[in-house]
């Protein structure tokens, strides 16, 4: 797969996503949950909140790049705060 230019950051990114999916699958099997309604007024499960977090984090990173707000690793801190808020209140 040399045509894909797999770099270490790319491999880590996809590895973390795969690990999250496996972890959330195991959690869903071991600890089933009922959907809950948060500030968005829609029923969400852990998987839904993970999807919202990943999608929002992608937009945060794109906006960070677009406005050149600073070094990109700082966007990770913003994404982590966003993820904590989504899993708490959504």
Image (tube, rainbow, N blue to C red):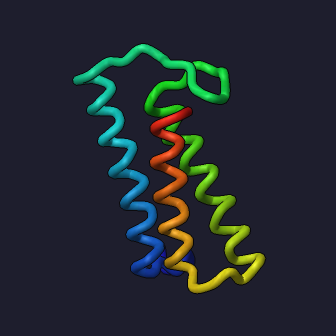
| 50 to 56, vertically: above or below | above
Q: Is residue 15 left or right of residue 30?
A: right
Relative image position of residue 1 (x, y in whole percent) = 47, 73
> Outermost residue, left direction?
30
Relative image position of residue 79 (x, y in whole percent) = 53, 60
Q: Is residue 60 left or right of residue 71?
A: right
| 36 to 9, vertically: above or below | above
Q: Which residue is rendered at x = 38% and y = 69% of the image? A: 12
Q: Which residue is more in the foreground, 10 or 57?
A: 57
Q: Which residue is rendered at x = 46% and y = 37% of the image? A: 88
Q: In this view, does 23 lie to the left or right of 54?
A: left
> Outermost residue, right direction?
66
| 90 to 44, vertically: above or below | below
Q: Which residue is more in the foreground, 33 or 70?
A: 70
Q: In which quarter of the image is the C terminus?
A: top right
Q: Which residue is rendered at x = 57% and y = 80% of the image? A: 72
Task: Specify the quadrant of the image occupied by residue 37.
Answer: top right
Q: Which residue is more in the foreground, 65 or 5?
A: 65
Relative image position of residue 25 (x, y in whole percent) = 34, 33
> Outermost residue, top direction?
34
Relative image position of residue 56 (x, y in whole percent) = 63, 52
Q: Is residue 72 left or right of residue 21?
A: right
How many marks on residues? Answer: 0
Q: Which residue is rendered at x = 46% and y = 39% of the image? A: 87
């Amino acid at each position: 797969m040399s045509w894909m230019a797999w770099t270490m950051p790319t491999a880590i990114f996809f590895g973390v996503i795969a690990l999250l999916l496996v972890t959330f699958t195991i959690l869903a099997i071991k600890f089933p949950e009922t959907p809950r309604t948060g500030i968005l007024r829609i029923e969400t499960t852990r998987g839904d909140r993970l999807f919202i977090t990943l999608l929002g984090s992608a937009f945060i990173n794109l906006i960070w790049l677009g406005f050149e707000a600073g070094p990109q690793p700082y966007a990770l801190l913003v994404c982590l705060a966003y993820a904590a808020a989504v899993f708490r209140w959504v």
